[in-house]
Image: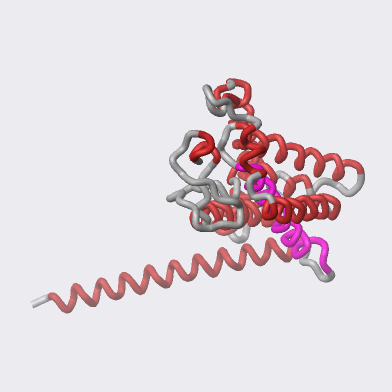
Amino acid sequence: MKFVLFFLLVAGAAVAILFSVFPRWDIEVASLFWYPHGGFLLALDPWAKTFRAFGHFIPWITVAPAFVVIILKFLLPHARMFMPARAAVLLALTMAVGPGLLVNGLFKAEWGRPRPVHVEEFGGPHQYVPWYDTNGTCPSNCSFVSGEGALSFWMVAPASLAPPGPLRVLALSSAVAFGVVVGGLRIGFGGHFFSDVVFSGVLVVVLIALTRYWLYDRRNAPSDAKVERAIGRAGLATRKGIIRLWHAMRTMTGKAGHNREP
């Protein structure tokens, strides 16, 4: 995990510096996939579109059991979880916070950077802005950072759960390669700039590394049993809170009805 984090941090720092000094490099990279009389032709390729769909659904299929087991533990606090609690929390939390809250809820909603296909250089209506400029004219679902890039690099999370040794190295390397290919397709489709994809990977992998440190790697890290008990207690507390709220609403409704009687 450390070598993946180091690699992406170095890559992110290099892109942050170079693409700030030479902000037009994003245009130059995108132009490699753009044809003046056809646009971003890779977006029309059936195989590329199929792989994009494949790359989009694989992370969701992977994370689904983690969400299911946590929801079931909330609903049935005394039942045993069918997968290790720390693994479930690592997968669900990093997916919800990374590609969900930070990328789609914060960056893409607030940054305002138009996508390559929408800028003037490639026949669009918007002016190009570099990655560090938050004042672009994109109204919503903007380019910085890449949502699908973040989703594909999230595969580092399940890969980090592989047994230590060569198998984990292979799993992490494959996860990074998966992110690079899916992110590269988004560049080729004109959906994102190079810097959008790089920073999406850095953001998600840093989040995964911090979450893994909290759950596994720090001194006095919790056990699976402790995390499972904590989820169960949260489920019980939530159930009791809902019951109290229900009784309070019934009491208020009853009093209101009684006060309306002649």
Which residue is most to the left? 262
Quadrant in the picture for the C terminus: bottom left
Q: Which residue is drawn at the image coordinates 49% and 46% (left, top)?
A: 127
* Count of numbered marks: 0
One can see residue 16 in this view:
yes
Q: Position of residue 211 (x, y in %)?
A: 72, 60
Of residue 221 and residue 49, the one placed in the foreground of this image is 49
**Magenta stretch: dominant SS?**
helix
> Which span of residues is magenta-colored?
193-218
The percent position of residue 251, horizontal first and vertical second, equals 30, 74
Furthest residue to the top?
A: 46
For the point 53% across and 46% down, the residue is: 128
Residue at 60% x, 46% y is: 146
In this rendering, the answer to whether 86 lies above or below 218 is above
**Rendered location of residue 27, percent (x, y):** 61, 41
Q: Is residue 127 left or right of residue 42?
A: left
Tell which of 123 and 207 is nearer to you. 123
Q: In the image, is residue 231 part of the stretch drawn in magenta? A: no
In the picture shown, does residue 96 fall above or below 33? below
Is 214 contained in the magenta span? yes
Height in image: 42 above or below 157? above
Residue at 55% over, 39% down? 116
The answer to whether residue 82 shows anywhere in this view is: no
Q: Position of residue 134 (x, y in %)?
A: 53, 58
Pick whichever, 206 or 89, lies toward us. 206
Q: Nearer the viewer, residue 102 or 214?
A: 102
Colour pattern: secondary structure
Image-based side of 257 in relation to 156, left or right = left
